[in-house]
Image (cartoon, coloured by chain):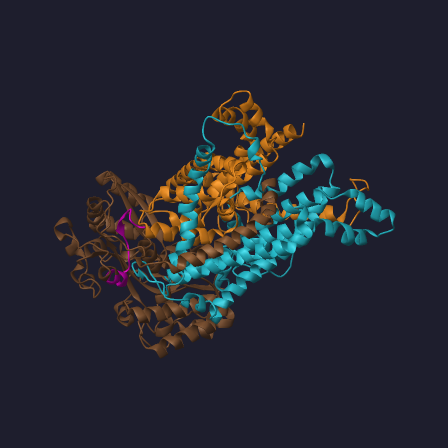
Chain colours: A orange, B brown, C cyan
């Protein structure tokens, strides 16, 4: 490989290979876009430009209701996680107590256990306590991994935080509550937001856990997409993917901008 | 997104090791201190009250479309939400996992009805609340699985067969054995259904046995014959072959006659054949589970679906054969004479209905199925 | 991970410390205990019941479900899952390293953040739709084969076979690998590379003697993440794999929501999957202690 001290504009084989890999990453997305404007839905030939799949998509009540179910689940799960996940991260950073290792271990388990195992165990648990499955059981199950991700991102920020900041506030007469809300929270906000975004995307994308914990009638977007791929694909699914990609691309950009700015601020 | 990198770093932290040690110790402790409990018993006595103007329907794909939902709504004011399954087994698995308690109407096949009745999942129908039950053809009223329609209302029937692209196959198939004799030509251009009973039944039949064989030797033989064909099979799918066949990715697919009429309508080069050695004659029904949150709406749906006009329009639009004589009479002649939809009697005579099997035999079928799909 | 906050330096607060601790830790703790720890223990118990379906009495009676794993067909499935996960890890490493190297060390500095973001952007879209896109590409009459035919080349039959699974899984996991390798390469001390060059090392020598050893922790971490995610992947084998792609995750799925219902066996398989993942991590900790102390 090249020594990096050479001119950055020199075309190395790594650069060519990287271009190829960028192509690999974007090929499926381009293909979906191609099909979404293509008149002939099943063939790889160009059959003329059309917007009819987008019209169909916006009139497809099943997809729209699945989208609203997914958003409900994601917002609720992320909302709960944002609060209790942040509290947990702060608590774990502050206190030592017997069983802390176990608590901490459990809080990171959802990050490593395969989704299918989480899905299966949650279904078994819900079956045992005979809770009727519904949209809210998905929320409960999603909150588990969402809160892990939020707590994880927040605790990496906590490590880098000046530990004396809060103490100073309390020395100046702030109550613990005040110092938490006025001093710690603003410091943690970028981390909480980026943790929430990560959790949100994962919740919107989860198929396995949702399909195991959903009650009849509760269908999230991934479940609906999966069922369509398994049964008969209607071409408006291509339009859906383009809309989703544009939306999540926008969210990703916002998230990265927030992270980038906060990191810049932190370094100053 | 750098959090991902942090995340992996986390895996390496030492605290994990201690955690793993503790949790393994904890796990083994708990396991020994267990007492008996019942797993996920479907509690038919606990009914959740649903919204009175909502009806959740659990059905096969292509059985309920937007037009039907709109027509029902304009007649009754009830909003229908439908979810789909692709085999009787997944439907029952979903039901037993407690995921089907919002459904007031389910569409099991006839042989699953008797199993669900035995398990005590279905509520007996109050015939005084149903109009038009007398229009059902006598042979569906006297079904061995639910004689007298005590628990189920037949909604469609059909056969299982082979749908092929007549442009790609110069020699048209006539029987199941075609798949084996033309294996080389069909390799990776063929799909079978994702349904243990239909696939095993078809192979049993091609060997000259019953679709519902309970003979261990015969079942084993069928499994071995199927294993022989496996390298040639693209996927096991009950529904997804439709797009692939239309796009030209497949030459032949095993499927239901209702789906066949549907794709043939889109591409007349596709043909449907009922294998000469015999096939399954299935019928799908509508039932009300005991857990139905909205039985009133369910009865309204059953009565609606029994209306001859509704049943006839559904047959014209979605192409599944109606068991309703009055509806049949209303169909245009092209459909009445469509042999895929309404096959001639001599072929029907050779067809069998899928029968419920003993638990041990069913487990044997499932064992071979797992073996087949796992290898 | 653990942050050391010297507790003795805390001033006396009006709310007792233990109460604050409870308020902070109990909500999430209860949630995790109820929906994660207890369920995991439950499936462990269930895994000791052979042939259980919903409605049956749970009566743990031995390791029958675990013995079943040693039957040839199940071993086959587990072997295939390991093969898919290992192959994907190697592919991701081979394809990801040059990309990460280029972005971190060779590309113009002000573009680096943007390039990295652009590379991982597809991660933010639905993974199901990405797999679905590969179906459209790899189908016998799909984009790839249409292209090959128009170039006069023979067509490729990849969909519904293992190559498609490898492609789909590599596609899904490559961005993670690049992210982690990038983080590791970015911290590479360039002075070592310069020193190596001054001492007359050829670029390949410098790469193998300096770059690789210094980024080994990143390579290990990336490989582990890709491996464990790949081991539990359900979507790619299910949608792209055809008849010969039953993996552990699919088999588990079938025991609960598929044609063959056996919750006990499914639980046993889940336990094995959890153990396999834990084992992979434990091995890395053990092996990584030597090299990864910097992490």
Question: Which corner quadrant of the image does residue B321 belong to?
Answer: bottom left
Depth order, front residue of A38/A264: A264
Numbered label tally: 0
Q: In the rendered image of this protein, does residue C112 appear above or below residue A222?
A: above
Depth order, front residue of A156/A66: A156
Q: Report the magenta residues as a range.
A: B100-115
Left or right side of B335 for C32: right
Depth order, front residue of B36/C54: B36
| Camera sees residue B170 | no
Q: In the rendered image of this protein, does residue C10 appear above or below residue C122?
A: above
Residue B326 locus on image (x, y percent): 19, 54
- What residue is drawn where x is 76% and y is 54%? C208
Does the magenta portion include B113?
yes
| Camera sees residue A46 | yes
Does the magenta portion include C161?
no
Residue A12 locus on image (x, y percent): 77, 47
- What residue is drawn where x is 56% and y is 27%? A166
Q: In the rendered image of this protein, does residue C122 appear above or below residue B209?
A: above
Residue B288 locus on image (x, y percent): 23, 52
Residue A121 locus on image (x, y percent): 41, 53
């Amino acid at each position: 490989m090249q020594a990096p001290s050479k001119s950055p504009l020199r075309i190395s084989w790594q650069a060519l290979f990287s271009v190829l890999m960028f192509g690999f990453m974007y090929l499926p997305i381009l293909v979906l876009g191609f099909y979404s404007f293509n008149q002939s839905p099943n063939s790889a030939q160009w059959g003329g430009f059309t917007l009819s799949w987008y019209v169909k998509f916006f009139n497809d009540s099943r997809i729209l209701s699945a989208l609203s179910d997914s958003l409900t689940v994601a917002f609720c799960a992320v909302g709960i996680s944002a609060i209790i996940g942040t509290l947990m991260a702060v608590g774990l950073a502050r206190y030592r107590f017997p069983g802390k290792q176990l608590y901490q271990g459990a809080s990171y388990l959802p990050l490593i256990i395969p989704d299918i195992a989480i899905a299966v165990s949650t279904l078994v648990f819900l079956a045992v306590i005979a809770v009727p499955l519904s949209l809210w059981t998905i929320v409960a199950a999603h909150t588990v991994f969402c809160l892990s991700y939020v707590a994880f991102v927040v605790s990496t920020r906590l490590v880098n935080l000046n530990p004396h900041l809060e103490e100073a506030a309390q020395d100046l007469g702030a109550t613990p509550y005040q110092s938490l809300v006025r001093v710690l929270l603003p410091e943690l906000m970028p981390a909480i937001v980026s943790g929430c975004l990560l959790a949100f995307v994962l919740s919107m994308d989860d198929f396995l856990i949702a399909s195991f914990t959903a009650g009849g009638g509760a269908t999230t977007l991934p479940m609906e997409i999966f069922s369509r791929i398994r049964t008969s694909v209607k071409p408006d699914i291509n339009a859906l993917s383009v809309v989703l990609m544009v939306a999540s691309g926008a969210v990703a950009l916002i998230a990265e901008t927030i992270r980038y700015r906060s990191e810049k601020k932190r370094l100053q | 997104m750098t959090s991902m990198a942090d995340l992996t770093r986390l895996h390496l932290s030492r605290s994990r090791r201690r955690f793993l040690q503790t949790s393994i110790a904890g796990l083994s402790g708990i396991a020994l201190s267990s007492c008996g409990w019942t797993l996920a018993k479907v509690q038919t006595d606990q009914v959740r009250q649903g919204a009175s103007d909502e009806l959740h329907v659990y059905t096969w794909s292509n059985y309920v479309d937007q037009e039907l939902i709109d027509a029902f709504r304009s007649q009754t004011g009830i909003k229908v939400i439908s979810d789909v399954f692709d085999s009787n087994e997944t439907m029952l698995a979903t039901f037993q996992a407690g995921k089907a308690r919002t459904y007031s109407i389910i569409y099991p096949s006839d042989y699953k009805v008797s199993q669900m009745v035995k398990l005590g999942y279905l509520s007996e129908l109050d015939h005084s609340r149903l109009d038009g039950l007398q229009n059902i053809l006598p042979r569906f009223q006297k079904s061995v699985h639910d004689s007298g329609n005590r628990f189920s209302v037949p909604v469609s029937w059909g056969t299982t067969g082979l749908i092929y692209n007549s442009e790609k196959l110069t020699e048209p198939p006539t029987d199941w054995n075609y798949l084996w004799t033309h294996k080389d030509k069909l390799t990776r251009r063929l799909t079978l259904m994702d349904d243990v009973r239909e696939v095993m039944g078809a192979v049993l039949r091609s060997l000259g046995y019953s679709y519902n064989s309970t003979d261990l030797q015969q079942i084993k033989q069928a499994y071995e014959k199927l294993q022989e064909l496996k390298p040639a099979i693209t996927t096991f799918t009950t529904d997804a072959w439709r797009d692939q066949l239309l796009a030209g990715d497949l030459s032949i697919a095993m499927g239901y006659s209702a789906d066949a009429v549907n794709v043939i309508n889109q591409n007349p080069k596709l043909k449907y054949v009922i294998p000469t050695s015999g096939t399954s004659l299935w019928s799908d029904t509508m039932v009300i589970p005991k857990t139905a949150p909205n039985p009133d709406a369910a009865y309204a749906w059953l009565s609606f679906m029994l209306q001859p006009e509704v049943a006839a329009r559904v047959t014209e639009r979605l192409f599944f054969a109606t068991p309703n004589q009055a509806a049949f009479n209303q169909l245009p002649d092209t459909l009445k004479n469509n042999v895929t939809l309404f096959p001639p009697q001599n072929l029907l005579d050779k067809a069998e209905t899928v029968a419920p099997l003993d638990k041990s035999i069913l487990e044997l079928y499932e064992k071979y199925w797992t073996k087949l799909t796992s290898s | 991970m653990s942050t050391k906050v010297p507790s003795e330096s805390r001033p006396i607060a009006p709310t007792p410390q233990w109460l604050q601790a409870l308020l902070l830790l109990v909500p999430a703790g209860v949630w995790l205990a109820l929906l994660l720890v207890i369920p995991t223990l439950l499936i462990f118990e269930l895994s000791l019941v052979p042939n259980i379906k919903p409605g049956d009495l749970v009566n743990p009676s031995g390791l029958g479900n675990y013995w079943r794993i040693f039957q040839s067909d199940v071993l086959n499935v587990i072997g295939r899952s390991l093969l898919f996960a290992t192959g994907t890890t190697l592919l991701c490493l081979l394809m990801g390293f040059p990309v990460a190297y280029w972005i971190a060390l060779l590309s113009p500095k002000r573009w680096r953040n943007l390039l990295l973001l652009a590379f991982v952007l597809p991660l933010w879209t639905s993974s199901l739709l990405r797999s679905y896109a590969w179906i459209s590409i790899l189908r016998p009459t799909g984009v790839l084969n249409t292209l090959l035919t128009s170039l006069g080349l023979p067509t490729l039959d990849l969909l519904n076979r293992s190559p498609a699974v490898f492609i789909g899984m590599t596609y899904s996991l490559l961005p993670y690998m690049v992210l982690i390798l990038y983080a590791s390469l970015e911290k590479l001390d360039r002075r070592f590379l310069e020193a190596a060059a001054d001492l007359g090392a050829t670029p390949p020598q410098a790469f193998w003697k300096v770059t690789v050893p210094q980024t080994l922790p990143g390579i290990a971490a990336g490989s582990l993440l890709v491996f464990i995610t790949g081991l539990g992947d359900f979507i790619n084998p299910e949608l792209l794999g055809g008849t010969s792609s039953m993996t552990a995750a699919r088999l588990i799925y079938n025991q609960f929501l598929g044609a063959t219902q056996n919750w006990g066996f499914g639980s046993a398989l889940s336990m094995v999957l959890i153990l396999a993942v834990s084992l992979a991590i434990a091995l890395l900790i053990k092996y990584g202690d030597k090299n990864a102390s910097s992490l």
